[in-house]
Image (cartoon, grey):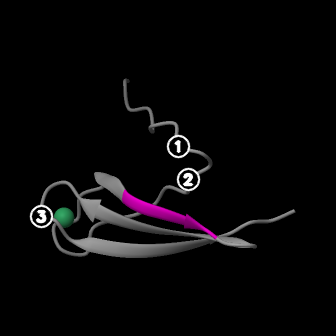
Amino acid sequence: MSQQPEADDGEQLGLECPKCCCWDFRAYYTRRQAKRIRRVKICRHCGQRITTTERIVG
Ligand SMILES: [Zn+2]
């Protein structure tokens, strides 16, 4: 039992690589805007790049 998600400022989990189905992403860049955060992540295994947008609540 050592599966602890990396502490990353409130990052949502549940991201799965569409290519290789792994869960191992690293952040490529993070851009903070007024009410949302945009992240680009790259799969450590296959290099697939995905973009996520998170909304800031509150
Ligand atoms: Zn992948």
Callout 1 amino acid: Asp
CA gap between label 3 and label 1 equals 22 Å
Name which quarter of the figure residue 44 lies in. Answer: bottom left
Query: How far apart are the alpha carbons under marks 2 and 1?
Result: 6 Å
Name the residue tied to disc 3.
46
For label 1, the SS is loop
Residue stretch rendered in magenta on the structure = 28-32
Q: Are marks 2 and 1 in contact (CB under 8 Å)?
A: yes
If the picture is divided into quarters, which one holds ligand 1? Answer: bottom left
Q: Is residue 5 left or right of residue 33?
A: left
The residue that mark 1 highlights is 8
The local crowd at label 2, few if under 14, some if 14 to 19, many if 20 or more residues have their Cα within 10 Å, is few
Q: Which residue is mark 2?
A: 11
Residue 25 spot, x, y in % from top left: 31, 55
Q: Residue at x 32, y 52 (%)?
A: 26
32 or 58, nearer to the observer: 32
